[in-house]
Structures are given as structure tokens and as C-alpha cells.
Image (spheres, rainbow, N blue to C red):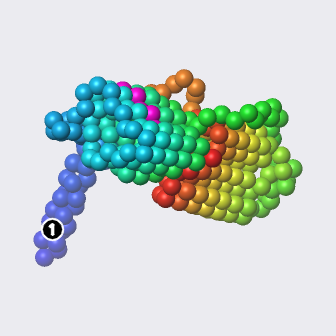
Amino acid sequence: MNILVLLFMTGVALLFLAQFAAAWRSTRKLQGKLDTGIDTGYIRMEDFFGVRLRALAGADQVVTGNWACAPGLASWGERHVRGSVNAGDGATLDSLAVDGSLTLGRSVTVLGWLDSHGAVQVGEGSRVAGRLTSAASVTLGPRCRLKTVFAPLVSTPPDNHTPAPAVTARALLSLESSADDWHALSLDWARVVRTGAATIAYQGDFRPTAPVELLMKLVVHGHLYLPAGSLAKGDIRASGSLTLGARCEMAGNATAGGDLTVGANGIFHQTLHAGRDLELGNGVQSGPAGVSPVNTWTAACAGRRLRVGAGVGVRGKLTAGEMIETG
């Protein structure tokens, strides 16, 4: 009987070893590769509606050459315009796929979406209910309202404000900073918790009293405020509100559970995400100037409302759960 039990246990052990060996061989084959079943090369087609209409439009939907909608008039139905479009003040449009440029006058209402291969000009007080995309650029006039806009450059006209000089003197904060370094900025060292190889968590509101240069990722369990001229080289996250003072530079991603504010002439290089409202102050810019490959797209996303000041330039996407509003 003991021999039978021993043989049975040996067989079970050999079966488990065989399964382990197969898994080990698979792991060796995948070493250095990613096999998650997810296509990491996938890029969302922001201009999907325009591509679809250009491919499927019937003869009655195609306009050859330039097309204009007179002021105050309404045009219904999706159209593919093989030229440029000019919509007069107070016009009402449906959805358009435009192969040239697109100009909307003052107080134009768009009930659908807009996609243009050329530059888009949106006049003061105009509204776009659906997605607005351009392969060139989008310029938004004052008091415009939209939901989502995407282009290599989305901008608002500049104001006459002269920006304050940049701040260059910053206090360094890193994983190696001492208790004295934190106390010098009126930050409580007892609230600092190292949570990863490059991440620090701060329990409570984070409000340094002087401009800082953050060399690590920072997670704040409270509100986060960076004084004017500060620089964050890693991702930062706050469970409450997140405020970047004037001329701050955000090299990583910034995420707020509540509101997120970027002060005048700030710079961000990746993604801003606010759980509630997001405000881009006058002169805020994103991404390296003159560069627009896909891997340098930036985004500003608001769960509720996104307010955009004058002289703002975003290389990529603006989107809001309720509404984008320009100043």
C-alpha cells in the first residue's frame, strides 16, 4: 500500500513539474516582449467621422469646389466638401468633412461634427455640439463652446498681457531630500511616505512656500499647490484640487481628483486631467514648439468644464465632459 501511495504522489509531482516546465519555456520565449493581447500600437482615429463620410458619401452629399453658407441660413445633412467652406455669421450647420480650410463666422451653430484637412477658424460665440478635428490647426475665438477638439495646434488669439520674467531659483525636492529640506519649505517631513522606487506620497495639503523643482513622482492625499515658476519633472497627482502657479512647467502628467488650474504662461508636456473643472490660464502652451509627431501629442481633459484663456496653444486634444469654453 505504501508503494502505491508513493507512486501516486510521484506521478502527481511529475505532472506539476511538466506544467511548470511548459510555462517556463513560454516565459523564456516572451522575454523582452509584451504579450497582453492588447495592441499597444493602436492610435485612436480622432477624424473617424470625416474618414467615414468621405468613403461613404452619396452623390447628393458631395460638394465639388468651395462652398459657402450665407449668414443666418441653415444647412441640414452631412456634406463632404471637396474644397473650402465659409459659414457666415449666425449660420446653422450639420456635419461637414472639408478637404480644404473651414471658417465659421460669429455665433455659428454646428449641430453635428466638423473635420477639416486644412486650418479651421471658429468665430466668436460659435458652438460645436460634436467633435471638431483638423489635420492642420484650429483657432478658437472668444466665448466659443465645444465638447472635443483635436489638431496639431489648437489655439486662442493672444491678449496684450506682458508675461512676468521666468523664475530660475528653485528649491530641489527629491527622494534623497532631508527633513530640513522639507521643513525649509514649510512642509511636514512626518507626512512624507516613500511608496515606490521613484514616488513619494504626502499625507495632507502640499503647499511649499517657495518655487520648487520636483525630481520625483508625487502623490498628494489632499490639495496640491506649486508656487509660480515651479518645475515638476515627474507625474504629480492630488486627491483634491491641483494648482500650478504662473510660469510653472509640468514635464510629466498632472491629475487632480477635483479642479485643476494652470496659471498664466504655464507649460505642460503630457496630459492634464481634472476630475472636475480644468482651467488653462492666458498664454499656457503645451509640448515642444514646432514638433507634432504622434508621440508628442498632449491633452487637457476635464470631467466637467474646461476653460481656456487667451493666447493658449495646445498641440493635441482638448476635451470636457460638459463643455469647453474660451475666454
- Residue 37: image x %, image y %? 27, 47
Quadrant including the N terminus: bottom left
Q: Position of residue 278 (x, y in %)?
A: 60, 53
Tell me the residue at 47%/49% (across/down).
127
Which residue is pictured at 33% across the width and 31% down the height? 67
Give yes or no for residue 101 being in the magenta stretch.
Answer: yes
**Circle 1 sits on which residue?**
8
Q: Amino acid at mark 1?
A: Phe
Q: Secondary structure at mark 1?
A: helix
Q: Is residue 106 left or right of residue 260?
A: left
- Could you tell me what secondary structure mostly forms the magenta stretch? strand
| Residue under the point 55% across and 56% down | 305
Q: Residue furthest bottom?
A: 1
Q: Position of residue 225 (x, y in %)?
A: 73, 53
State which quadrant residue 174 falls in. top right
- Magenta-drawn segment: 100-104
- Figure check: 94 above or below 99: below
Magenta stretch contains residue 216 = no
Q: Is residue 139 visible?
A: yes
Question: Front-most of 296 and 318?
Answer: 318
Q: Would you place residue 116 above or below residue 196 in this image? A: above
| Foreground of the two, 306 or 27 | 306
